[in-house]
């Protein structure tokens, strides 16, 4: 028997990607309770393996553990070495993403076991759970793959798998609206994916060795480097629902709420910002212009969205729009990082975790509201806090996390971004101050929404199914605790993520 | 200068090819195709002798077995069960002959003149490889012409076979080192798809009452 | 065990207490007593630590608890003289209000106590933490957590629409203010020679910036002042205060007014003593602070007169009294460079008034809470004469009201007197200060007027309550806090030197070493009387003991005379010019006293309507990119695809033809690219 201590992070990477995929395969053939259990077991295995891998990495956070898996056959007549394309690796940045992806994935699986039931008032679901879990676990697997991808090519493969999964899951209910929304998400993100391909082709054509390695951009000629970065940026915009591609995301709210949670808190959209974070982390000498482009577009997105959500009545759509603006925050962290501010970059990365927990919590809370009441219109809800106190705690903690009220996680990330921006001075300082203003507006709005929905006289009767909602309650409580403590775990890791200068 | 047997044989390939394309009686067309294939095999043999490459004898064997024996047998299996005359093609016989001849001449001339753009090696742009390659392309073009202008499904199969023959003929110049086994694989493949097409065509006939490819979209119902 | 460990222990105790009370929330009484137990022990520990610092005069610091490396910040708990003062008032208020809450919070069973005691304990923990860190980052974290906790308690009665609105207004206003403070802090941090959020590092940053960009320093100081003024309830930034204080549960209103708004003052003091070197900036902003204070005194006191809601009246009074504190601080800061002796006295006067206000305003809120507990109404027109059934409450209320109005012999007079003295003497240097002080003195009379109204309507006069009201004093657990808070009101009034001695340590500690004149040279050496000498002159003296002895002597004499003359007293009904009316019909209600006032000063504090945002349909349409870009684009795409699909007619021959055409095109393109034939 192998002692636990002897297992290195490398040994865990392949099982880590495989576990959710096997789970997904099994779930295809299962129904109802059986699929619940199998999905939960495989989500747990993934979580444990991820914990093992991350824990292992803690002994040396500057290290990168690589597992090369396959090379591309060279086209005849080429004399250069065959490029490594299939590769898993884990480093500090990957570990951060892995943490978000597996923890929230696990909680979403647990939560779903109750959410998708005939007791759900909004969408009673009797069967079809096997299909749901299969796609969900595939999604988790693909996201784990993105977190562990060792190069751009590998990342792209998992990237497109997530696109596919989000299409299937958004259309899960198979009514007119959700089919349309799923198709829209598929089209827009796939078009973004084409730009990713373009970037890959450019890298392959212009680099003889390791064309897809993460530090490839740094080795390109400056003009080409900016071009490739812009292509990757467009891909990330589409994935992370940034202006002008943000329109698919509010529509994607047709998905079951746990899926919306996973899509927005941890998976799909985070893949986009993760790509940019990767590029900024590994590339040397990104030009001022590309940083400016990233920053300005993110800023435009943030303000357009903040304007839109002031006039929105649908709770989930508010969360969707807020997600878009928070991805903008992360991108601004990356843009400021490209301009040379390590502080802001770390802030952006911390925001991946902070926003993951906060927004995840918000979605799960709103999911519980719809589960018990069947509506998610703000104007139709009041006094929810009296009936569902845990949900109220979850919503407020989540809202305060994403809007940055100390000591919750969002404060620290926003604080770092703000500090970084002001340190750089000039236009970066303007961006930072605008972010602060947006933060205030969003805070006020979320507080208003929270009060409107949770305070006052209850708009519905006491939930009858209180006893069986424990999977959902547990998920909400765990995330609420995470919102408070995630900074403590994430900051030491983030400090070891390099910034290409 | 190479001796002329190869050129003579390829001329036979061309003429019998035109006959296979233009004869309206399907049985006659099949016979023409048989002769066409014989000439083809002969060309291979001639190349084997001229370039002293023994592996080409395998090619000859394979060509005779499939192109001269199996494919005509398959076509015959179809023809004796169905009407012997092909469906009226889109062009009349005389017009078709004129157009085909013009096409062949122009195409042969074009390819032969600009061979150095196509030929992968220096040797290929020299005679007799040069003429042979030009003939190969011309046969290929003939196959395409048949495919485009004929309505009858069986005639289309013959067109495809001509097209394949053109391709195979070019191989002798373009890839003379191709192992015999691989060529056998190639021609067996062609035989198999002819068999499938014949089978499908007879199915079409049963459903539509004619082998008219123009009416294929009716099968969707 | 080091003294600082007492403080850290108290913080841990409060957090544990929060967890324990959260678990006990279903058992309301038990939960209250447990909370009280935790708060009492923690307060004693904090009090001991703070008193230790004040008596030895040297700050204490602990080891780093938590380090955040990317920001070069570590959490170290430090108590200096200034924080000790705030810690002492916090512990006193914490003990009293928690004990008061135990019975008070039993009444309304609609609301779960899980939102009360745990949050209250966390709130106290955050207040203690805010004043005992010397790192701006952690200061901000605890500061905003304090806001968060207080918000939860302000909106405790979630069914009450007023509470919701006030809570929203409160949290948003203070959060924006905190944003300003945050911005100012980061601006300092980014310019610091040593990148750190420690006060010392930021001080160096300010020093450097003063030379290079004074405009930026003015901006930073403005952000700080506005931010802290918002929290401290200084008008026009403290507009949230009169709405939020009345709606909170009464014990927490006492905490808000007694404790939390004071932290704003602490913030300003920290900014101008620990983050800014002594310079003309201090002078300029000192004057501004004094002006803001006076505006608050003027507007809030006159508005308080118009109130009929007892707790709202108290809230406006809080703003007014905070105005006095700010005036004193402003005078102190303005003079700090010019005339240290006067400045030190002014700062001490401000701190003294702060301590006094913490005592009597908390007491008044507890009094109002007790009245509310008994009668169920905050409307002064609907209750009256409660002295008959609640003598202890009434007496403590009278003490507090007299103290806050500045009646000699009680603590309010002592501190206000010092404020006025220092302001007038300071006027020799900056004439504007005299004007401000004169305004403050006159408004002081208004304070007396509205407290007479408060006392007169609620406690004295004929008993006027509904039949359903139980006619007896509130429970002992609610009386003890009131009496406890009344003690300092009297003690500091009779023996002001008792407080001044320790406040001198606090004020001395925040100024440069050797800066302030010796205590005895400022206040004389007699423990019974304040012999104030400013600028080397004997400026005034106040010996409350002697005066009180004389006062009591006169009372005794008067009583003796009345007894010796066998004067008779009799009870008669009110004379209504011969008309016969029920008393309740002809009762002179609160607002009638001041109708004229209300008419003239109503515009002083106008309600600001929140405009409803129009729905900007045009912009929303413009931002709907789907509608004008993607969907039309898709329709065009569909049209093109239809055209292309027309080529798929279903003939195999046609497809072959397309292939040939395509191949031919490709060949032509290739030839033309390669410079073909």
Image (spheres, rainbow, N blue to C red):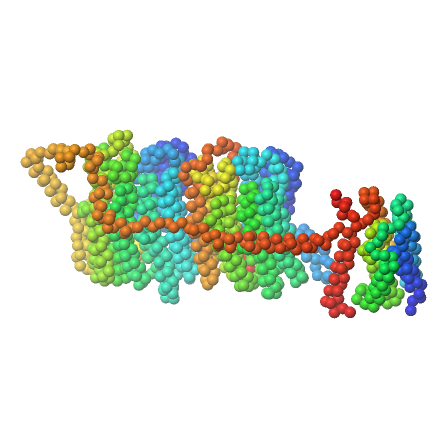
> Which of C141 and C82 lies nearest the eye of the viewer?
C141
* Position above or below: C585 against B69: above
> Which of B170 and B217 lies nearest the eye of the viewer?
B217
Work out which residue is located at the far left of the displayed protein and give it.
Answer: C565
In the displayed structure image, the side of residue A284 where residue C93 appears, left or right: left
In the displayed structure image, the side of residue B1 where residue A13 appears, left or right: left
- Judge whether residue C360 can be spotted in this image: yes
> Which of B21 and C591 lies nearest the eye of the viewer?
B21
- Judge whether residue C33 can be spotted in this image: no
* Residue A449 occupies quadrant: top left
At x 50% / y 39%, what residue is drawn? A375
* Position above or below: C332 against A362: below
* Residue A387 occupies quadrant: top left
Where, quadrant-wise, is the C terminus of chain A in this rendering?
bottom right
Where, quadrant-wise, is the N terminus of chain A in this rendering?
top right
In the displayed structure image, the side of residue B56 where residue C154 appears, left or right: left
Q: Position of residue A366 (x, y in %)?
A: 50, 41
Q: Position of residue A277 (x, y in %)?
A: 55, 55
Q: How many marks?
A: 0
At x 13% / y 33%, what residue is drawn? C572
Q: Position of residue A37 (x, y in %)?
A: 60, 35
At x 88% / y 47%, what residue is drawn? B83
At x 39% / y 36%, what residue is drawn? C111
Q: Position of residue C587 (x, y in %)?
A: 20, 37
> Which of A414 and A283 lies nearest the eye of the viewer?
A414
């Amino acid at each position: 028997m192998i002692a636990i201590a002897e297992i290195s992070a490398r040994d865990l990477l392949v099982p880590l990607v495989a576990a959710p995929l096997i789970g997904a395969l099994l779930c295809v053939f299962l129904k109802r309770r059986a699929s619940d259990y199998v999905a939960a077991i495989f989500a747990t295995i993934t979580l444990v393996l991820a914990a093992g891998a991350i824990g292992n990495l803690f002994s040396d956070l500057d290290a990168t553990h690589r597992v090369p898996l396959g090379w591309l056959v060279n086209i005849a007549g080429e004399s250069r070495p065959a490029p490594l394309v299939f590769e898993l690796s884990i480093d500090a940045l990957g570990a951060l993403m892995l943490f978000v992806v597996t923890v929230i994935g696990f909680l979403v699986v647990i939560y779903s076991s109750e959410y998708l039931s005939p007791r759900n008032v909004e969408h009673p679901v009797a069967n079809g759970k096997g299909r749901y879990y299969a796609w969900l676990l595939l999604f988790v697997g693909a996201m784990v793959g993105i977190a562990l991808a060792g190069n751009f090519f590998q990342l792209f493969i998992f990237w497109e798998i997530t696109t596919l999964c989000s299409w299937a899951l958004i259309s899960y209910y198979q009514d007119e609206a959700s089919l349309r929304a799923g198709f829209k998400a598929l089209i827009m993100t796939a078009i973004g994916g084409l730009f990713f391909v373009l970037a890959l082709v450019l890298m392959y054509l212009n680099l003889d060795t390791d064309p897809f390695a993460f530090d490839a951009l740094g080795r390109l000629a400056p003009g080409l480097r900016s071009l490739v970065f812009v292509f990757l940026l467009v891909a990330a915009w589409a994935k992370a629902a940034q202006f002008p591609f943000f329109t698919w995301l509010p529509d994607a709210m047709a998905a079951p709420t746990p899926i919306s949670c996973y899509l927005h808190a941890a998976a799909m959209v985070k893949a986009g910002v993760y790509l940019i974070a990767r590029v900024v982390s590994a590339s040397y000498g990104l030009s001022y212009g590309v940083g400016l482009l990233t920053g300005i577009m993110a800023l435009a997105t943030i303000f357009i969205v903040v304007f839109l959500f002031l006039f929105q009545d649908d709770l989930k759509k508010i969360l969707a729009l807020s997600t878009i603006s928070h991805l903008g925050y992360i991108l601004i962290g990356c843009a400021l990082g490209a301009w040379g501010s390590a502080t802001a970059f770390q802030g952006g990365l911390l925001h991946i975790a902070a926003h993951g927990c906060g927004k995840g919590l918000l979605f799960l809370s709103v999911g519980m509201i719809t589960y018990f009441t069947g509506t998610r219109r703000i104007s139709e809800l009041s006094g929810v806090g009296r009936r569902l106190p845990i949900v109220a705690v979850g919503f407020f903690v989540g809202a305060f996390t994403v809007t940055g009220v100390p000591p919750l996680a969002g404060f620290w990330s926003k604080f770092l971004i703000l500090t970084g921006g002001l340190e750089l001075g000039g236009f970066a300082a303007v961006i930072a101050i605008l972010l602060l203003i947006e933060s205030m507006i969003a805070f006020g709005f979320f507080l208003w929404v929270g009060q409107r929905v949770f305070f006052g006289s209850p708009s519905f009767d006491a939930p009858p199914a209180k006893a069986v909602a424990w999977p959902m309650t547990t998920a909400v409580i765990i995330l609420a605790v995470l919102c408070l403590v995630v900074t403590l775990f994430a900051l030491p890791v983030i400090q070891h993520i390099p910034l290409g200068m | 200068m190479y001796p002329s047997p190869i050129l003579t044989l390829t001329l036979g390939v061309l003429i019998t090819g035109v006959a296979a394309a233009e004869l309206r009686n399907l049985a006659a067309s099949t016979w023409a195709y048989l002769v066409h294939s014989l000439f083809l095999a002969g060309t291979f043999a001639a190349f084997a002798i001229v370039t002293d490459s023994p592996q080409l004898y395998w090619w000859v064997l394979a060509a005779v077995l499939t192109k001269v024996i199996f494919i005509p047998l398959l076509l015959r299996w179809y023809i004796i069960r169905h009407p012997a005359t092909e469906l009226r093609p889109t062009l009349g016989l005389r017009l078709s002959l004129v157009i085909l001849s013009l096409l062949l001449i122009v195409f042969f001339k074009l390819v032969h003149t600009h061979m150095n753009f196509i030929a992968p090696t220096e040797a290929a742009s020299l005679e007799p490889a040069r003429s042979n390659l030009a003939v190969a392309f011309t046969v290929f073009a003939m196959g395409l012409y048949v495919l485009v202008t004929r309505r009858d499904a069986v005639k289309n199969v013959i067109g495809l076979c001509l097209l394949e023959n053109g391709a195979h003929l070019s191989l002798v110049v373009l890839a003379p080192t191709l192992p015999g086994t691989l060529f056998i694989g190639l021609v067996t493949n062609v035989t198999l798809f002819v068999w499938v097409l014949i089978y499908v065509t007879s199915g079409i006939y049963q459903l539509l009452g004619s082998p008219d490819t123009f009416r294929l979209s009716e099968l969707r119902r | 065990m080091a003294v600082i460990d007492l403080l850290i222990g108290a913080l841990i105790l409060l957090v544990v207490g929060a967890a324990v009370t959260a678990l006990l929330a279903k058992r309301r009484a038990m939960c209250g007593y447990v909370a009280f137990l935790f708060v009492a022990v923690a307060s004693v520990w904090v009090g001991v630590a703070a008193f230790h610092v004040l008596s030895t005069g040297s700050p204490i610091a602990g080891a780093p608890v938590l380090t955040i490396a990317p920001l070069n910040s570590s959490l170290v708990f430090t108590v200096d003289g200034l924080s000790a003062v705030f810690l002492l008032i916090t512990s006193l208020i914490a003990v009293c209000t928690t004990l008061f809450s135990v019975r008070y919070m039993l009444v309304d069973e609609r609301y779960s106590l899980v939102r009360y005691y745990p949050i209250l304990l966390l709130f106290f923990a955050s207040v203690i933490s805010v004043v005992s860190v010397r790192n701006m980052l952690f200061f901000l974290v605890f500061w905003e957590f304090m806001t968060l906790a207080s918000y939860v308690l302000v909106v405790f009665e979630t069914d009450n629409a007023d509470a919701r609105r006030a809570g929203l207004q409160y949290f948003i206003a203070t959060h924006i203010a905190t944003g300003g403070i945050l911005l100012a802090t980061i601006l300092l941090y980014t310019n610091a020679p040593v990148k750190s959020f420690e006060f010392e590092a930021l001080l160096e940053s300010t020093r450097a910036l003063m030379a290079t960009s004074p405009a930026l320093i003015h901006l930073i100081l403005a952000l700080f002042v506005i931010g802290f003024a918002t929290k401290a309830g200084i008008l026009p930034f403290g507009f949230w205060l009169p709405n939020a204080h009345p709606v909170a549960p009464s014990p927490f209103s006492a905490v808000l007014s007694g404790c939390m708004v004071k932290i704003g003052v602490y913030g300003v003091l920290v900014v101008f003593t620990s983050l800014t070197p002594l310079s003309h900036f201090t002078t300029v902003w000192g004057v501004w602070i004094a002006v803001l204070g006076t505006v608050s005194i003027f507007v809030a006191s006159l508005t308080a007169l118009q109130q009929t809601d007892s707790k709202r009246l108290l809230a406006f009074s809080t703003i007014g009294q905070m105005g006095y504190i700010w005036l004193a601080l402003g005078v102190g800061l303005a003079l700090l460079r010019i005339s240290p002796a006067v400045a030190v006295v002014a700062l001490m006067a401000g701190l003294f008034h702060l301590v006094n206000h913490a005592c009597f305003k908390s007491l008044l809120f507890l009094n109002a809470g007790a009245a509310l507990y008994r009668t169920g109404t905050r409307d002064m027109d609907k209750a009256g004469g409660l002295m008959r059934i609640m003598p202890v409450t009434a007496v403590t209320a009278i003490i507090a009201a007299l103290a806050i109005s500045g009646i000699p012999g009680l603590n309010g007079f002592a501190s206000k007197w010092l404020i006025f003295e220092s302001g007038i003497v300071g006027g020799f240097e900056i004439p504007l200060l005299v004007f401000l002080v004169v305004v403050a003195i006159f408004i002081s009379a208004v304070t007396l007027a509205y407290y007479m109204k408060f006392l007169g309507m609620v406690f004295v006069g004929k008993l006027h309550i509904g039949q359903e009201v139980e006619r007896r004093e509130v429970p002992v657990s609610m009386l003890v806090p009131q009496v406890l808070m009344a003690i300092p009101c009297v003690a500091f009034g009779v023996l002001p030197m008792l407080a001044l001695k320790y406040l001198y340590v606090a004020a001395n500690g925040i100024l440069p070493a050797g800066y302030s004149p010796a205590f005895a040279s400022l206040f004389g050496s007699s423990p019974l009387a304040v012999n104030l000498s400013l600028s080397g002159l004997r400026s005034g003296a106040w010996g409350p003991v002697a005066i009180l002895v004389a006062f009591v002597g006169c009372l005794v004499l008067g009583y003796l005379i009345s007894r010796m003359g066998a004067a008779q007293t009799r009870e008669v009904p009110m004379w209504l010019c011969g008309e016969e009316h029920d008393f309740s019909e002809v009762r002179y209600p609160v607002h009638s006293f001041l109708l004229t006032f209300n008419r003239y000063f109503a515009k002083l504090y106008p309600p600001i309507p929140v405009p409803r945002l129009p729905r900007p349909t045009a912009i929303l349409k413009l931002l709907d990119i789907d509608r004008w870009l993607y969907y039309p684009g898709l329709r065009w795409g569909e049209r093109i695809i239809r055209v292309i699909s027309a080529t798929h007619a279903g003939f195999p021959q046609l497809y072959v033809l397309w292939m040939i055409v395509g191949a031919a095109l490709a060949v032509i393109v290739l030839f033309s690219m390669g410079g073909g034939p």
